[in-house]
């Protein structure tokens, strides 16, 4: 493969990954559209993820370590990487437009920067601090009354939608600080899916949020399966791309995931947005550009 062809291939993977991540947002909206609750959706997300990742792990000829240390790590990743953020996100997306939630998810790198500074994992940078400021301004523009939100009452669900990017930011810093105990990305995600599914069984039953796997199936069931598959595919591609092209290249998916999330919402859900929404999106993208590392030496990959 020539350098030009390889570069085009890597950009193709990046675009496909962004499209998959963005696609998971309107699918999540469909999953909650008929009354399915967050715990039930999260359980099946874990199950579908475990089945897909388990098949990949078997094809690779690798085992899943199940020692006490690994089990604790799987539980931690399941909690801060899926259970806590998705519980909040599914409740928020039931009320908020998908485009709003997609834009707010672009705050992950901006939220990760102050956490990294706090834990001593990164160095202070005026440029990246400026990116954080742009992100805050973007949120303010987004939630101005009579601006981007179709209903001013939706403003009370914005803090709920901000929980997901905050936990994702902590997840990345947790891995950067303590590593993955010798686990590769597939093993980590598989272990977290298996442990997460086990944890969620009593939770879904106790809260009355169990979703039966028996027919018949509707749009909400399609949304659960599609969002879960898109999520797994995007994560696998993301970690593969980090190893192939580096984290600085792979992290550019943040723009694409946000953009595709908005695009898919317009196409699938017929969402429309105000001029203020597009202004907020532009400001967020500027902040995203400023806060991201400029060279591979600025960010160590926990999986390498």
Image (cartoon, rainbow, N blue to C red):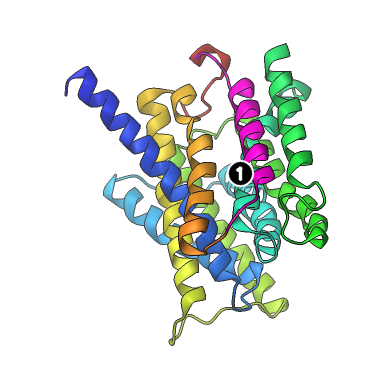
Q: Is residue 47 above or below residue 216?
A: above
Question: So how many labels did they put on this image?
Answer: 1
Residue occupied by mark 1: 73
Q: Secondary structure beneath disc 1?
A: helix
Percent position of residue 213, x then y: 47, 80
**Residue 216 shows up from this direction:** yes
For the point 44% across and 82% down, the residue is 217
- Predominant secondary structure in magenta? helix
**Residue 190 shows up from this direction:** no
- Check the picture and name the quadrant holding the C terminus: top left
Q: Nearer the viewer, residue 243 or 164?
A: 164
Q: Is residue 41 left or right of residue 215?
A: right
Q: Which residues are magenta?
A: 272-295
Percent position of residue 246, x then y: 43, 23
Q: Nearer the viewer, residue 135 or 55?
A: 135
For the point 39% across and 27% down, the residue is 243
């Amino acid at each position: 493969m020539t350098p030009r062809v390889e570069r085009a291939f890597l950009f193709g993977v990046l675009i496909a990954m962004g499209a998959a991540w963005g696609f998971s947002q309107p699918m999540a909206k469909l999953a909650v559209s008929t009354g399915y609750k967050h715990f039930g959706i999260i359980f099946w997300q874990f199950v579908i993820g475990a089945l897909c990742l388990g098949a990949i792990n078997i094809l690779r000829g690798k085992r899943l370590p199940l020692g006490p240390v690994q089990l604790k790590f799987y539980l931690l990743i399941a909690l801060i990487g899926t259970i806590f953020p998705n519980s909040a996100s599914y409740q928020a997306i039931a009320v908020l437009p998908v485009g709003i939630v997609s834009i707010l998810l672009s705050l992950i790198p901006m939220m990760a920067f102050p956490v990294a500074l706090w834990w001593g994992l990164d160095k202070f940078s005026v440029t990246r601090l400026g990116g954080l400021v742009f992100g805050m301004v973007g949120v303010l523009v987004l939630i101005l009354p009579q601006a981007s939100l179709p209903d001013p009452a939706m403003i009370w669900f914005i803090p709920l939608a901000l929980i997901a990017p905050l936990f994702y930011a902590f997840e990345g810093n947790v891995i950067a600080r303590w590593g993955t105990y010798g686990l590769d990305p597939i093993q980590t995600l598989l272990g977290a899916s298996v442990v997460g599914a086990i944890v969620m069984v009593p939770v879904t039953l106790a809260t009355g949020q169990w979703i039966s796997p028996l027919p018949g199936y509707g749009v909400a069931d399609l949304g659960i399966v599609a969002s879960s598959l898109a999520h797994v595919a995007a994560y696998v591609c993301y970690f593969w791309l980090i190893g192939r092209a580096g984290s600085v290249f792979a992290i550019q998916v943040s723009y694409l995931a946000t953009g595709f999330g908005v695009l898919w919402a317009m196409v699938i859900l017929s969402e429309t947005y105000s001029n203020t929404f597009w202004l907020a999106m532009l400001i967020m993208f500027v902040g995203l550009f400023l806060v991201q590392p400029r060279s591979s030496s600025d960010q160590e990959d926990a999986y390498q």
